[in-house]
Amino acid sequence: MNIGILGLGLIGGSLGFDLRSLGHHILGVSRRESTCQKAVALGSVDQASVDLSLLAAAEVVFICTPLALIVPQFKEMIAHLSASCVVTDVGSAKAQIVKAISPLWDNFIGGHPMAGRTDSGIEAAQRDLFVDKPYVLTPITTTKTSAITVVEEIVRSLDAKIYYCQPEQHDRAVSWISHLPVMVSSSLIAACLSETDPDVLELAQKLASSGFRDTSRVGGGNPELGVMMARYNRQALLRSLQQYRQNLDELTNLIEQENWAVLEQKLKSTGKARPDFVD
């Protein structure tokens, strides 16, 4: 197939690698000519351009731009697409995107691959990024079955695990396991930086190991992505943050009260629940 990728960053570039290796002809579009040249040189795409007209030959288009650009870039792009072209996106918030695009394009289905790294840009793209990773599709009642089938087949070819849900369900779920951790991780780093003794802060930085690395990783990622998560999934994220604050307050109270028995039970309970989220 002729597959277009609008946005040649980590996700777009990685999609290009895998889909091209499966024999598809990949048409890449980026805002920067330098990114287009790198994508071709790296082998992520067959052709690349800053001109959206390159997508006229595409049978399927993946929109892989930052969240804030998905809808406006789509609106610019549709003038160049054939009426039969299937369009999907990879945004990490779905309700607003699906609500905006679905009335404008019959062959649209929202999507979100749950894969990524803290690095960004075409240089961060890698092969097999989506293998065994969740890939969420968010069809609604008006979504064409034919469009769902086309995107399903492509996602399956990436060896990703497909999940289906409503856009609003997706946003509530990812607020807990993706968007909240970014804010919590950022807060952890900020809290450490509040240490007023420079010698103690330097010692903490030197002693930080795997535990701190794991819990702070997503807080050290792309700040633009964090802002977009908050902006496009505001209500669900606020709900998650408020619940997290309540749980943190409970732990604080237990420690203040030296209630070690209840604290132990709470830690046992969360330790037992963790495997349900992480294999």
Image (cartoon, rainbow, N blue to C red):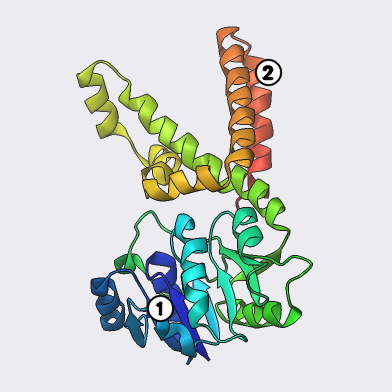
* Image position of 192 with respect to 197: above or below: below
Crowding at label 2, few (<14), some or many (≥20) Cα neighbours within 10 Å?
A: few
Circle 1 residue: 52
116 horizontally vs 148: left or right: left
Q: Nearer the viewer, residue 245 or 144?
A: 144
255 horizontally vs 215: left or right: right
Crowding at label 1, few (<14), some or many (≥20) Cα neighbours within 10 Å?
A: many
* Image position of 80 with respect to 1: above or below: above
- How far from the left and from the top, in percent, is residue 32? 28, 69
* Image position of 78 with respect to 176: above or below: below
Looking at this rendering, what residue extends furthest in the front direction?
A: 79
Circle 2 residue: 262
Under tag 1, what secondary structure? helix
Q: CA distance from mark 2 to mark 1?
A: 59 Å
Residue 279 appears in view: no
Q: Amino acid at mark 2?
A: Val
Give the image quarter of residue 106. Answer: bottom right
Q: Amino acid at mark 1?
A: Leu
